[in-house]
Amino acid sequence: MPAGRPSPGAQSARRPPPLPLLLLCVLGASRAGSGAHTAVITPQDPTLLIGSSLQATCSVHGDPPGATAEGLYWTLNGRRLPAELSRMLNASTLALVLANLNGSRQQSGDNLVCHARDGSILAGSCLYVGLPPEKPFNISCWSKNMKDLTCRWTPGAHGETFLHTNYSLKYKLRWYGQDNTCEEHHAVGPHSCHIPKDLALFTPYEIWVEATNRLGSARSDVLTLDILDVVTTDPPPDVHVSRVGGLEDQLSVRWVSPPALKDFLFQAKYQIRYRVEDSVDWKVVDDVSNQTSCRLAGLKPGTVYFVQVRCNPFGIYGSKKAGIWSEWSHPTAASTPRSERPGPGGGACEPRGGEPSSGPVRRELKQFLGWLKKHAYCSNLSFRLYDQWRAWMQKSHKTRNQDEGILPSGRRGAARGSAR
Amino acid sequence: MDLRAGDSWGMLACLCTVLWHLPAVPALNRTGDPGPGPSIQKTYDLTRYLEHQLRSLAGTYLNYLGPPFNEPDFNPPRLGAETLPRATVNLEVWRSLNDKLRLTQNYEAYSHLLCYLRGLNRQAATAELRRSLAHFCTSLQGLLGSIAGVMAALGYPLPQPLPGTEPIWSPGPAPSDFLQKMDDFWLLKELQTWLWRSAKDFNRLKKKMQPPAAAVTLHLEAHGF
């Protein structure tokens, strides 16, 4: 729109007065000779399927008297239509035939306009050309701390109907009849909705999406779910990563159970992931069940690591299904101590002055730690683990000439740092 | 500021600077009243801000309506838009408006326009467009409040009916979608014109409120500072 001085006095039926000033507006009189009152387009605001045809007419009324359809022309979305598409039906009516219509250019409808010879607008009609909606699918929902429910879905045919399509998420308790409609749209993107309260536990919900537009409607399949099976929670707060004494290849990670569900997370699972500062590859430690600490082993000395933890409220209130993983906690950084001997890797440092009496114990401990480095994932330095190791030591002594790298149970730790 | 030789110059300059910035400057004539100066400035600033906001909102909205509505020189017939408050006015008439009338016309215009804007309930508009419209309505409500503040500071009564009650000129839906589009077009255009005019209105008011500071200077000089 022009930012300069407006001159609305220049109506189609009047010459603009020559004054270069702000003009006095003349009400009423300017209405008579102008605009849509002197012509009518039929059909008004029709809705059509893509590929169909349209026959329209522009009928000029007798005001001013003697007005004819001579010289009138059509535009569609501002572009003049070829003369061969229109013809005069009679003295006061201009007809138009449009075949094989494309989908509407904008959802507010295509603008079909009938113009007088001088270009002024006589009448207009909005054309809505599109497709009926296809069945929405792929509904997925999650509940944050059992307090609410957020669902998202995929619209059928990528949602391109060329018409405004209304999506409505509906839900009802399985055995209690009443349909409810979700009101908070666009919670996490265009095809999502958030139900903030009044959710019942222990009875399944039936959830579906209805898509409606001017040409029809479609309904998704019904999803039946129990709130307790789709619970997610906040990431664990207070994640602390610290060194383990002087051990140069280990870091200890500690966190707190997410507070909102802290009294219910009997079987919660956690996952830890970590990466070197300037790498994009995360290593994931998987089997952290219901602990709030873990020791990462097999790390590179003198390196900064970023660590994140997330939680899955598995088995909440007796649910048999896995819950939904929370977001990862904010990355926490820590660095492993520098290696005191030159060269890569290396085990624990040798102390300067040794204690002579603890020689064999020291050696055994060193070997144990070496084993730990290679094979342990989330190790707590417990007696159980130590015994496991001792058992392995004994077994490996028997098969000394054979392959040494296999654990008695056949497992390999998930946090091996040797590949780096 | 008058230049005076001698050691009184510095004190005079300092005093004038301090007093200029005190909101109580015009209050040398009235007691306690902060004066309308700052709120006139604020209202002026608001009209400029709204003008800027409207530019991007109108652009998006007209693109939504589609061509030819978003074409630069589009000038459709003005029909339902007859009920819109018109900003354009004869220059002499505008110049000669007294403060009360000037403010009242602004206040009434924006009350009307806000009402129409709120009724701009285009079901088919995108969520983003609906948000922008809602945001603009809130800002416009702020402008109305600001104008009301200026009127109160100058002792003028607010025009009746108060906003919130159902006005006689409440917009009904147009008989066809195309006519509705034309109404929308003119609403945005009229809004733009009003904001352009209001900036000039408040600038004029601002200038009218400035002389009291000069009066203070003269007053101090007379006492031989």
Image (spheres, grey):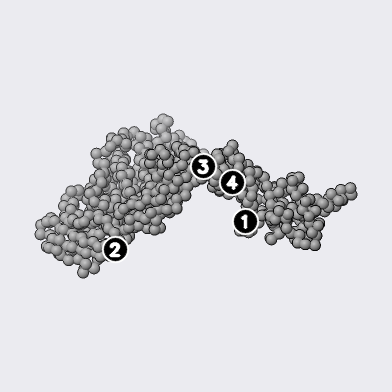
Dots 1 and 2 on the same chain: yes
Eye-nearest disc, 3 or 4: 3
Q: Residues within 10 Å of mark 4 (few under 14, many from 20)?
A: many
Numbered tag placed on residue A51 in the rendering: 2
Picture residue at 32% right of the left edge, 46% below the top: B121
Q: Position of residue A358 (x, y in %)?
A: 86, 48
Q: Position of residue A145 (x, y in %)?
A: 53, 41
Amino acid at pointer 3: Leu
Q: Relative to B30, does residue A75 appear above or below in the rendering? A: below
How far is the residue under mark 3 from the one under mark 2? 48 Å
Task: Identify residue for label 3.
Answer: A228
Q: Position of residue A324 (x, y in %)?
A: 54, 47
Work out whether mark 1 precedes mark 2 in sequence or the reverse, and give the earlier one.
2
Work out whether mark 4 precedes mark 2 in sequence or the reverse, and give the earlier one.
2
Task: Identify residue for label 1.
Answer: A282
Q: Residues within 10 Å of mark 1 (few under 14, many from 20)?
A: some
Work out whether mark 3 precedes mark 4 in sequence or the reverse, and give the earlier one.
3
What element does badge 2 sit on? loop
Image quarter where the N terminus of chain A lies is: bottom left
Amino acid at pointer 2: Gly
Q: Chain of mark 3?
A: A
How far is the residue under mark 3 from the one under mark 4? 15 Å
